[in-house]
């Protein structure tokens, strides 16, 4: 409708309508560019680790764990410290790809070491086995 008004030149304020529409388009483009910059900044600080086994999203390395980037719909996470074992990126990649890790060394609260594997359960939780 606005384009028809502009094309016919009937509106007294046609120039202001054109300016308004152009400003809306420009503001939206700037908002999209800012969002893209924020995503790039986040991704540069949180390197990509692999693909989420639950939803196929991207797993990113954060300060406390490795989380799915699809945070609005997927809550999959592998914590950095699991029973005294510091998870490496390679271990997380293996877990996400094969649903199981090689044998890892864990510690009890008393500091006693024991070995085991991590698996992803049917409810998408990381479990020691």
Image: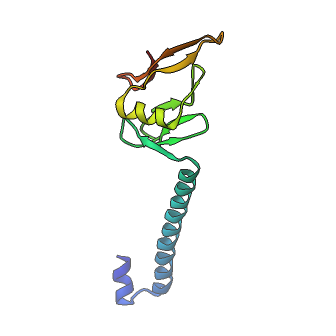
Q: Position of residue 56 (x, y in %)?
A: 36, 41
Relative to residue 66, is residue 83 depicted above or below? above
Image quadrant holding the N terminus, namely bottom left
* Picture quadrant where residue 51 is located: top left
Residue 70 versus residue 4: which sits nearer the camera? 70
Residue 69 versus residue 106: which sits nearer the camera? 106
* Picture quadrant where residue 107 is located: top right
Q: Residue at x 61, y 38 (%)?
A: 63
Residue 100 versus residue 5: which sits nearer the camera? 100
Relative to residue 110, is residue 35 depicted above or below? below
Compared across the picture, whether 7 is left or right of 36 comes to left
Q: Residue at x 50, y 30 (%)?
A: 78
Q: Total label count?
A: 0
Q: Residue furthest bottom?
A: 9
Q: Residue at x 51, y 65 (%)?
A: 33
Image quadrant holding the C terminus, namely top left
* Picture quadrant where residue 38 is located: bottom right
What colour scheme governs how the chains and residues are painted in the rendered image of this protein? rainbow
Q: Position of residue 4 (x, y in %)?
A: 33, 82
Q: Position of residue 126 (x, y in %)?
A: 45, 24
Q: Residue at x 61, y 10 (%)?
A: 112
Q: Position of residue 99 (x, y in %)?
A: 37, 28
């Amino acid at each position: 409708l606005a384009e028809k008004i502009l094309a016919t030149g009937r509106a007294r304020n046609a120039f202001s309508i054109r300016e308004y529409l152009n400003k809306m388009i420009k503001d939206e483009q700037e908002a999209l560019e800012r969002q893209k910059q924020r995503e790039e900044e986040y991704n540069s600080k949180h390197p990509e680790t692999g693909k989420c086994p639950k939803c196929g999203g991207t797993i990113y390395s954060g300060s406390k764990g490795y989380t799915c980037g699809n945070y609005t719909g997927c809550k999959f996470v592998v914590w950095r410290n699991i029973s005294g074992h510091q998870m490496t990126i390679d271990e997380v990649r293996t877990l996400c790809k094969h649903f199981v890790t090689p044998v890892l060394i864990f510690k009890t609260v008393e500091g006693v070491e024991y070995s085991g594997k991590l698996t992803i359960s049917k409810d998408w939780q990381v479990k020691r086995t």
